[in-house]
C-alpha cells in the first residue's frame, strides 16, 4: 500500500501516482503542507490528532485508518493504526472508499477546490456518507476549529495523481 | 420624576438633546479633588526631581523581582503565552486577585499599591468565576487564526450569488441577516464582563478581546454577504429575547453558559450547516472561516463552566442555580429556534428551493434540530451539568415529532 507508481495523468504528463488508501498518500499531503508553510501559517495553528478512516479500505473490506498528528503548521507523524489504536485520536473522519474517491476526484477536477457537495464538512455534517466521531465533544470540535486547515490539507491532493485500490 | 432617571429622557432624544455631563462631571471633579493628596504628591515628587535634573533610577533595582531568574525561551511556534507563563512567578494565576490595580502580575508592585487608585469596577475577584484551563492556548490560536473579511473571501465571485434562483438568493440573504442580528451579542456580552475582571486574570481578558474581534468580523462578513447578495432582509423579535438573556444573565458563568455553550454551540451547528448548504463557493468560504472561530468560543465556554462547577465550594447549589438559569435560557432559545426567519430559509436551502422546503427542506431542518439538541446535551455532560432529564427543549423538531 505504500508504493508510489508512475502513470500518465489526465493532463497528459507523466507523473508519480500515489495509491489511496495508503500512508504514502497522507505523507504526500504532509510534504505539501510543509512546502506551503506560508499558506498554513496564514490559516493559523492546527493542533490535533486526526484519524482518517476508510471504512472498507483494509484487507477484505475491513477499516483502514491513517493517524495524522498535526502540530502548528505541519504534520509531525503519519502512521497506520489498522482498525484502531489507543490512545484515541481527537476525532476520526470516516467514510467508505467510494465516498473518499468521489471527494478526491472532485478535488482534482476542481484543481484543489472540491465541488459544493464534496467538502469534508458537507460530507460529514449529517453523519453520512462521512462521519466525524470522538469520545469527547470538546475534542470532536477540533474538527471544526481547524476545518479550514484540514480541508486545505485534503485539498492538497489535487497536486498529484491518485490511484485507487 | 427625577427617580425615573435618564431612561425616560433617552426615549425623547433628538440630536440637540445629547446630554451634557453635568452632575456626572461634578462628581468626577469631587472624586479627583479628594484623592489629590495621593496623586498630587506623586506629581510634586516627580516634578521636584525633574526640576533638579535628577534621575530616580529606582526601577533598576531588581530586588523582589524575578529578573534574570526566570529566563524563558520561544517554542517552535514563536513566544507564546504558555512559554512566558512557564516560570511560576509569571504563570501562577492567583485564586483571588490580590488588588484592584492595573499593575502586572509578576512585576514589582506591592510597595506601590498604597499609592495607586482602586478600580472599583473590578468585581470578579475569584479566578474560578472566569477561568478556563484552555484559555491561554485558545488566545494563541485565536490570534493565529485571524482572517480578513475584506480580502480572505473571494468576493470577486459575487456574481455567482447574483445568478442564483431568487428563492435561494432570498434564503441565503435572510440567513446572513439573521446572523448579523445575533452575532454581535457575543462581543457585547464579554465586553460587559471584561471591565469587571481584574488584571491578574489577564489571559481571560485577552481571550475575551479576541472573541469580540471575531464577532466584529462575523458581523462584518455577514453584513457584506447580505448586501452584496441583494440586501438585508428581516429582523426577528424572537432572536432578541435570547440576546437579552445573554446580556442580563445574573453572573458571568450563566452568561457564558447561555452564550458560549448553548447559543454559540447552536450557531456553530448552523455555520456547519451553512457550509453544507452554501449555494456558492464564496458562501462556503465564509462559513468555513466563521465556524472555526465559533468552535473556539464554544471550547472556552465548555471549559469555563466546567471549571466554575468543579471549583465551586458548594457545587450542588451552584449546579442547581445553573439548572434554574438553563430552564429559562432553553425556553427563550426555543423562541429563537422557532422563528420563521431562521427555520424557513434553512429549509429552502436544505431543500434546494422553495418547492421542496416543506418536504426535503423541513426534513433537513429536523435533522439539524436533533443535532443541535444532542450536541448541546453532550456539552452539558462535559461540564458536569446533566440536563437530560431536565432539558426543556424538544428533542425532535415540532413537525417531526
Image: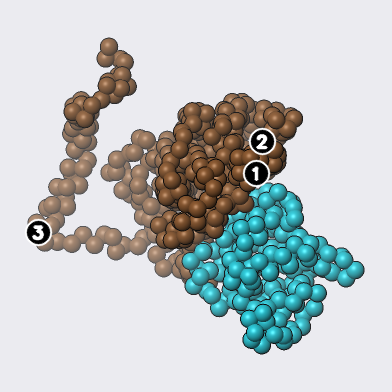
Chain colours: A cyan, B brown
**B328 on left or right of B216:** right
Q: Which residue is mark 3?
A: B52
Image: B160 above or below B257? below
Q: Say few, some or many: other residues with alpha carbon within 10 Å of mark 2 (under 14 / 14 to 19 / 20 or more).
A: some
Q: Furthest-right residue in view?
A: A60
The CA span between labels 2 and 3 is 84 Å
- Mark with earlier residue (3, 1): 3
Of B98 and B131, which appears nearest the observer? Answer: B131
The percent coordinates of residue A70 (x first, y second) are: 63, 67
The answer to whether residue A61 is above or below residue B102 is: below
Q: Nearer the viewer, residue B123 or B62?
A: B123
Dot 3: chain letter = B
Q: Which mark is residue B130?
A: none
Q: Quadrant of residue A55?
A: bottom right
The residue singled out by tag 2 in the image is B358
Crowding near the residue tagged with mark 3, few <14, some 14–19, many ≥20 C-alpha atoms within 10 Å: few
Tell me where residue B183 appears, x and y as whole percent: 48, 42
Label 1 sits on residue: B351
> Mark 3 or 1, which is nearer the eye?
1
Q: Residue at x 63, y 40 (%)?
A: B355
In this orientation, does residue B67 appear? yes
Inspect this view and state whether residue B314 appears.
no
The residue sitting at 27% across, 44% down in the picture is B115
Residue ranking furthest to the top: B1
Q: CA distance from mark 2 to mark 1?
A: 8 Å
Please say if the residues under marks 2 and 1 sit with CB atoms less than 8 Å apart.
Answer: yes
Within 10 Å of the Cα at label 1, are there few (<14), some (14-19), or many (20+) other Cα atoms? Answer: many
Query: What whole-number distance in Å separates the C-alpha atoms at marks 3 and 1?
Result: 80 Å
Image quadrant holding the C terminus of chain B, namely top right
Residue B40 screen position, x and y as percent: 17, 42
Amino acid at each position: 500500500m505504500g508504493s508510489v507508481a508512475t502513470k500518465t495523468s489526465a493532463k497528459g504528463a507523466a507523473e508519480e501516482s500515489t495509491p489511496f488508501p495508503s500512508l504514502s498518500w497522507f505523507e504526500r499531503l504532509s510534504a505539501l503542507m510543509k512546502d506551503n508553510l506560508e499558506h498554513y501559517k496564514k490559516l493559523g495553528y492546527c493542533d490535533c490528532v486526526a484519524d482518517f478512516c476508510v471504512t472498507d479500505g483494509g484487507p477484505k473490506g475491513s477499516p483502514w485508518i491513517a493517524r495524522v498528528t498535526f502540530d502548528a503548521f505541519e504534520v509531525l507523524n503519519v502512521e497506520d493504526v489498522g482498525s484502531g489504536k489507543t490512545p484515541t485520536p481527537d476525532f476520526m473522519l470516516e467514510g467508505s472508499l467510494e465516498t473518499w474517491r468521489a471527494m478526491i476526484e472532485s478535488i482534482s477536477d476542481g484543481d484543489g477546490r472540491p465541488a459544493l457537495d464534496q467538502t469534508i464538512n458537507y460530507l460529514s455534517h449529517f453523519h453520512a456518507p462521512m462521519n466525524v466521531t470522538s469520545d469527547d465533544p470538546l475534542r470532536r470540535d477540533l474538527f471544526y476549529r481547524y476545518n479550514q486547515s484540514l480541508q486545505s490539507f485534503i485539498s492538497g491532493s489535487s497536486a498529484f495523481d491518485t490511484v485507487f485500490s | 420624576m427625577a427617580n425615573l432617571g435618564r431612561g425616560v429622557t433617552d426615549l425623547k432624544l433628538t440630536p440637540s438633546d445629547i446630554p451634557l455631563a453635568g452632575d456626572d462631571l461634578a462628581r468626577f471633579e469631587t472624586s479627583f479633588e479628594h484623592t489629590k493628596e495621593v496623586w498630587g504628591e506623586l506629581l510634586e515628587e516627580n516634578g521636584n526631581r525633574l526640576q533638579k535634573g535628577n534621575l530616580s533610577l529606582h526601577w533598576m533595582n531588581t530586588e523582589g523581582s524575578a529578573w534574570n531568574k526566570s529566563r524563558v525561551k520561544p517554542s517552535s511556534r514563536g513566544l507564546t503565552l504558555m512559554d512566558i507563563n512557564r516560570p511560576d512567578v509569571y504563570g501562577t494565576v492567583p485564586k483571588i486577585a490580590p488588588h484592584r490595580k492595573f499593575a502586572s502580575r509578576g512585576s514589582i508592585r506591592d510597595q506601590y499599591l498604597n499609592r495607586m487608585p482602586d478600580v472599583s469596577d473590578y468585581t470578579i475577584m475569584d479566578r474560578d468565576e472566569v477561568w478556563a484551563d484552555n484559555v491561554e492556548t485558545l488566545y494563541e490560536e485565536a490570534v493565529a487564526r485571524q482572517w480578513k473579511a475584506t480580502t480572505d473571501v473571494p468576493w470577486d465571485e459575487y456574481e455567482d450569488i447574483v445568478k442564483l434562483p431568487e428563492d435561494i438568493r432570498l434564503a441565503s440573504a435572510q440567513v446572513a441577516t439573521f446572523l448579523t442580528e445575533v452575532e454581535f451579542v457575543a462581543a457585547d456580552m464579554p465586553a460587559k464582563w471584561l471591565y469587571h475582571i481584574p488584571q491578574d486574570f489577564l489571559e481571560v481578558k485577552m481571550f475575551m478581546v479576541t472573541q469580540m474581534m471575531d464577532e466584529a468580523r462575523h458581523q462584518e462578513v455577514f453584513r457584506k454577504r447580505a448586501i452584496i447578495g441583494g440586501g438585508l432582509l428581516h429582523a426577528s423579535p424572537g432572536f432578541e429575547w435570547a440576546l437579552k438573556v445573554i446580556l442580563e444573565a445574573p453572573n458571568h458563568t450563566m452568561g457564558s453558559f447561555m452564550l458560549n455553550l448553548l447559543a454559540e454551540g447552536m450557531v456553530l451547528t448552523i455555520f456547519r450547516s451553512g457550509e453544507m448548504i452554501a449555494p456558492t463557493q464564496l458562501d462556503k468560504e465564509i462559513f468555513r472561516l466563521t465556524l472555526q472561530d465559533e468552535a473556539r468560543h464554544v471550547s472556552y465556554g465548555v471549559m469555563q463552566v466546567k471549571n466554575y462547577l468543579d471549583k465551586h465550594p458548594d457545587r450542588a447549589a451552584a449546579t442547581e442555580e445553573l439548572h434554574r438559569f438553563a430552564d429559562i435560557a432553553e425556553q427563550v432559545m426555543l423562541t429563537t429556534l422557532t422563528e420563521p426567519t431562521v427555520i424557513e430559509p434553512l429549509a429552502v436551502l436544505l431543500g434546494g428551493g422553495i418547492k421542496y422546503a416543506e418536504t426535503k427542506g423541513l426534513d433537513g431542518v429536523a435533522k439539524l434540530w436533533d443535532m443541535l439538541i444532542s450536541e448541546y446535551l453532550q456539552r452539558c455532560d462535559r461540564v458536569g451539568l446533566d440536563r437530560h432529564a431536565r432539558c426543556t427543549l424538544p428533542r425532535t423538531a415540532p413537525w417531526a415529532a
